[in-house]
Image: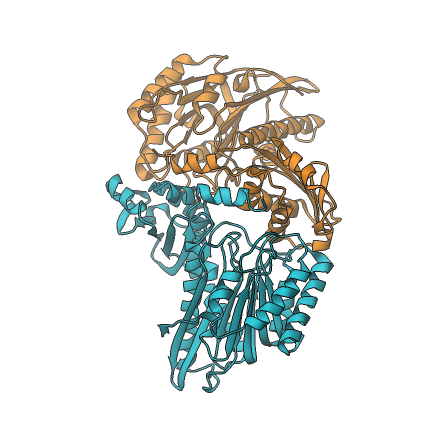
Chain colours: A cyan, B orange
Amino acid sequence: MKAVEGGVCAPKGFRASGVAAGIKPGSTKLDCALIVSDAPATVAGMFTTNVMKSPPVYRNQDVCAAGSARAVFLNSGNANAATGERGHADVQTTVEAVAGALGIGAEETCVCSTGVIGVPLPMDRIQNGINNCAKALSAAGSPDAAVAIMTTDTVPKEFAYEVELSSGTVRLGAIAKGSGMISPNMATMLCTITTDVSVTAADLRSMLQAAVDLSFHQMCIDNDLSTSDTVLILANGESGIPPIDPDSNDREQFQAALTELCQELAMALVRDGEGASKFIEIAVSGTASDDDAKTIARAIGNSQLCKTAFFGEDANWGRFACAAGYAGVAFDPADLMITLGDLPICSGGLAADYAEEDAAAIMKQHDIRLTVSVGDGSGRATFWTSDLSHDYVSINADYRT
Amino acid sequence: MKAVEGGVCAPKGFRASGVAAGIKPGSTKLDCALIVSDAPATVAGMFTTNVMKSPPVYRNQDVCAAGSARAVFLNSGNANAATGERGHADVQTTVEAVAGALGIGAEETCVCSTGVIGVPLPMDRIQNGINNCAKALSAAGSPDAAVAIMTTDTVPKEFAYEVELSSGTVRLGAIAKGSGMISPNMATMLCTITTDVSVTAADLRSMLQAAVDLSFHQMCIDNDLSTSDTVLILANGESGIPPIDPDSNDREQFQAALTELCQELAMALVRDGEGASKFIEIAVSGTASDDDAKTIARAIGNSQLCKTAFFGEDANWGRFACAAGYAGVAFDPADLMITLGDLPICSGGLAADYAEEDAAAIMKQHDIRLTVSVGDGSGRATFWTSDLSHDYVSINADYRT
């Protein structure tokens, strides 16, 4: 498995584009993206569990249930969420326009929208965006697509890998965007993954679930689950190698690559979290189950007081201990060990014997690893989070203005 | 029921004091408080559910299980949490010193500590604080006690009521402190309530639970549940009126007064929340149960994005709808109604027809009421929260320094 260029166009038979259509009034940034497979692709997706899920989410769930897709149209600047019947009608108009421009079926077309909630899509501009995206499609279009889906993201997120299977080489590519309202449950904000492997829809769904559980489900930027979270994967078989046998070593290798890709994306989202000045990895072990470890890691990663301590570069381990304690997982405080980088700061539930200046030096780093052990169980989990900064408050106090 | 002066000393037979003992190195603020009942009092308490609960919490649970108390000693500047065996030994030393100074039993003595986690108590200073508190006890001591338990609070919280029962007048008084790490579950940060009513321990516990469920359990400042949350109530019977009959109208009246007292305290804690520039009341209705309504109200009240929108005075109702949607309670988005003050801003899950400047004018107020309805069920709940401001980040980034 090795990193390659090309993003979502690294796999064979995919083209992409990104154009500016003025979706957010007055904006000249790229805001519409299109990803197209030359051949019908097996598709699977994971979606927000929010009751207020957006019309595009319902649409993509239908396409994934049918199991085959050719195109994904994405826009930033407007989430088409809390838009009711009009929102659903706008989705239908959008997929018909995309299908018409590409000469494919509307039922093969997914659509993702991100941005402000509660405002109808400007459909004349969406129509222009679709037309210009279709014209601009190319095998070099992934970088523009990655930029076009950004909202408060400051850098595009785009990755691709080559994976050697027993019968030949396959490729995986992806773009994703964050970077607030990020507390995924079943998925995260918009992410589209492409691959030229051949695989059944059921197996693709199963592998996506496994990858997402170890990536987007183990991160947060704030504690808000969005209306629009969507991860889609399209597998078009254009590598030409035979379909993956669900019981083979090839499947394990492909699963590992897909999981690693999703983890790279999740970490990239956290690094670019709204206002983030730190990237924090929290590794929890010693619980009865992996789920218990994840619960503790999430409590620390979600804690406003832990996140402000990271922002303040204050090794206030009492807050980490406190958050572990309220996570909802029973443990004996006397078993609690907390290590900051390589420095034990809490041992047996008490302050370890360390020099505050050594802890302060670690807290000054941009990337910080916090290791928490609560016993001798075999459960373990890794979670990624950002700090809570003044910039986070500023970004979100001014979001609509 | 009417408000009176005197705080925890308003009920007959209680004295209190607050002194400066330098618990936080270099500090000259009042930091030790003592509340004493002249006669043995029935006692009940509610406590944090945190696994890392502090040694004082264990102590108070034991005293409440026995059911009788005479004194509560409280200190700020140090939580005596995550202090292990030494922390438990320090609690024992403290209650013995208090008992010695007052000529009461150690088993009748509660102790509450709040402040930094993970640092042993400075016992020489605690000893001085106990001695000076005992000397300073008076019926006018409640204001000093209320100040002495403050950490990041900017104002003391002290209330008292007189309640007319059928057989005479009884009194209730309380002091409490916040103002960060406030997401109570079973209780909140330190609160001591006194009353001169006569009541059984079981009934006192039952009434306290009912009052706390409608007050401290319906508020948050951040999403952090502390190691030290403690609500204690001491009922010494010194009013001289007969014990409350559990089946009487008097009990209902006393319960109503106790609930209102706890609600006043909860609202005061939120108003003085760390960095708070707004006081927000969230009223949710239309759910199948009150618990469902509380779950939705809590999701909105806990949401970093809703709280930053309040700070930014931005009527971004999409965030309120989004938080309601991820709370974990099923509802039909078409039933969602959101009203800001008296202004409908979301109707049938869509933007209502309102002028943005009217919404902006309401968001500029200090006290804001948000009403959310999700159907025609009879469930309802009220929740209080603060906004998430730059000052919150600054206070918590610098807490230990």
**Does residue B156 sit above or below A357 in this rendering?**
above
Residue B22: quarter of image? top left
Q: Is residue B122 left or right of residue B281?
A: left
Q: Pick whichever, A219 or A195, lies toward us.
A: A195
Which residue is found at the position 37% from the left and 17% from the top? B101
Q: Tell me the quadrant of the picture where the N terminus of chain A can be found.
A: bottom left
Could you say where residue A70 lies in the image, as x and y percent from the top left?
A: 58, 76
Could you say where residue A290 lies in the image, as x and y percent from the top left?
A: 42, 61
Could you say where residue A33 lies in the image, as x and y percent from the top left?
A: 55, 66
Q: Is residue B141 left or right of residue B314?
A: left
Q: Pick whichever, A285 or A152, lies toward us.
A: A152
Could you say where residue A98 lies in the image, as x and y percent from the top left?
A: 64, 71
**Does residue B279 sit above or below A45 in this rendering?**
above
Which residue is found at the position 37% from the left and 54% from the top? A281
* Circle count: 0
Q: Pick whichever, B292 or B255, lies toward us.
A: B292
Q: Tell me the quadrant of the picture where the C terminus of chain A can be found.
A: top right
Residue A19: quarter of image? bottom right
